[in-house]
Amino acid sequence: MSETPLLEAVEVSKRFTVGSRFSVRGRHIVHAVDAVSLAVRPGEPVGLVGEAGCGTSTLGRCMVRLYDITSGTLRFNGVDISGKSMREMRPLRKEVQMVFQDPYASLNPRRRVRDIIAEPLRVHSKLPGEAIKTRVAELLDLVGLHRDHAMRFPHEFSGGQRQRIGIARAIALAPKLIVLDEPVSALDVSVQAQIVNLLADLQERLKLTYVFIAHDLSVVRQVSTRIAVMYLGSIVELGRAEDIFARPAHPYTQALISAVPVPDITKSGSRSRIVLSGDVPTPVNPPSGCRFHPRCPMAQDRCRTERPVLSPPDGGRRVACHFPL
Amino acid sequence: MLEVRDLRVSFHTEQGLMQAVDGVSFDVKEGEILGVVGESGSGKTVSLLAVMGLISDPNAVITGSIRYRGRELVGLPPRDMRKLRGREIAMIFQDPMTALTPVYTIGWQIAEQIMAHEKIGKAAARTRAIDLLAEVNMSDPAEAVDRYPHQLSGGMRQRAVIAMALSCNPALLVADEPTTALDVTVQAQILDLMRKLQRNHKSAVVFITHDMGVIAEIADRVMVMYAGRIVESGSKRDLFLDPRHPYTRALLDSIPPLAGKRPRRLRSIPGSPPSLLDRPAGCSFGPRCPKRFDRCAAQPALTGASHAAACFLVAPP
């Protein structure tokens, strides 16, 4: 494993302006992602976890430059890509691809599967028509679809099959990094497991690196070796998946893990459960100090005024809490 | 209290007859929580909508018998059904935003429901609404009563919907995926709340979900549905400790574990659920079943008393 991270975010922030477009007073700034630093090393799948409004999707989209970042630096393979124009980004699109949550909305209903998968090849490679056809057939095999499916339209497929089409499109150019934004949350449980297995196979065969965004902790645990837990736009805990699940250090991580309903009745009684009160606050007007303090069962005076920063790595683990567990 | 016998719901569609619910029979006893699990298209929502008398599609055909406290609900005139619904049987939906009217305050909506079923004045109904909001742990109920749905978060909206459903103290509460649209930490709050309310009000609850984890937390008895039929039913203990139908077992296996060693691969179920327009002959799960054998060409009946499964591999007791 090389030392240069494949993708490195340094103090990346993304702010959106919401509210009235006409009056300055009605305007608000949403700090969707607030000075996040994260390095994705080659071959080391990273899971981004957090509830709605915590900035995981926004960060994912910033990483592939679907959003322009407000401040900070993004480096891909050591090259600064934060300020690159669309045209300058184009060669990099081959290396970084994305898979979206909704397999219904992310495929053009008027195009055949063949054309959907061939699109990135037509744009980026100089392959002749025949070669593209062969490659599309290969890709269909790779994601477990039938070659005959190439001539069909998206509406003829089930949700799981559509997600396979989306994955085939993402891997068409043999990218190095794929950002997957909730790729299985729209699917039925029995189909989720198929897609999770497919992603694991592809990772091994094609040497892919994933950034996996999901709110389902058990799925994230299955696919990533490192996990970043986000709360209200910042990373609150970062570390190896096993460590985080075995011994969460941030109270939010602990509550998040304990809130997952486990289909095991022998254990559900013995598990101590932490039920947080309230909701994730709005990022328009985040709480002072530690942003988690209004919901934190362990909050003290210091948490209300002073914002904790991510601790220096301790055995690969970093946590943003004054009183880690 | 609720007896459903051989319920069938089908819809005439352009592509032919779609059999959404195909011969479902079950009981709900006073004060129990029945969990109904199944994937999308398994008929779990449609069968309970039929119980609520909420299938108004002119292309729908409902046959069979639904008896609520001895009273037959299939074919009941809408006027009589309306008196029952809300007062005796209430429902909570998955998406709290669409279950609420955006143009009225939640207090108004709860009060309206109370006034529709009881002889009560406006001011008294409003007071009741505030009490109900307090009961569902709404923060600052006196202020929340005048809020519009869009001013509330998803969890708070679902609380308002639950308050509305509880307003007439129903004997039977049908909850259709009430926590699916919510975040995990909020889901935990709502599950806690529902358990507490069920204890206090002693209502029977039918809890529809696709999440086996949620079932393990909340249900007393469980019913697993697949392609419009019940494939297994039994107590929570029976179902989780001794799953008999291959589908139930596969469903439990396909969930990634949260603790312990990470399996290299998840045991997944191949294929996808069948289309209800073109159901396979014999056992519906047959084409995806790892244990398929020649008898599966016929349709297995649900056999067994308290713990029943529809599979030829399950020896009749």
Image (tube, coloured by chain):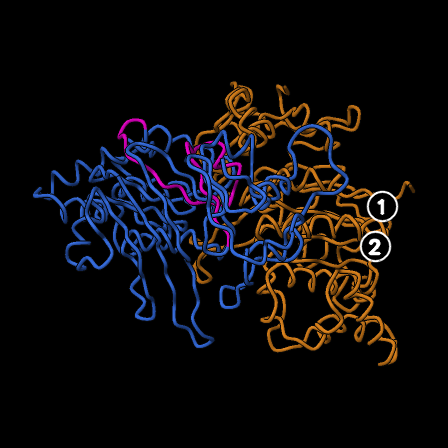
Query: Where B150 falls versus B214 (above or below)?
Result: below
Please say whether residue A210 is one of the residues in the magenta stretch: no
Q: Quadrant of the C terminus of chain A?
A: top right
Give the x, y percent position of residue B158.
37, 43
Residue type at the position of mark 2 = Lys
Query: Where A1 falls versus B150 (above or below)?
Result: above
Which residue appears at 69% of the width and 73% of the height? Answer: A113
* One can see residue A289 in this view: no
- Left or right, residue B191 beside residue B251: left
The residue identified by callout 1 is A42
Query: Where A63 falls versus B216 (above or below)?
Result: below
Classify 10 Å Cα crowding around label 1: few (below 14), some (14-19), many (20 and above).
many
In which image quadrant can residue A238 be found? top right
Q: Residue furthest right?
A: A2
Q: Are marks 2 and 1 in contact (CB under 8 Å)?
A: yes
| Display colour for chain A | orange
The residue identified by callout 2 is A176
Q: Chain of mark 2?
A: A
Q: Chain of mark 1?
A: A
In which image quadrant can residue A173 be found? bottom right
Please say whether residue B223 is one of the residues in the magenta stretch: yes
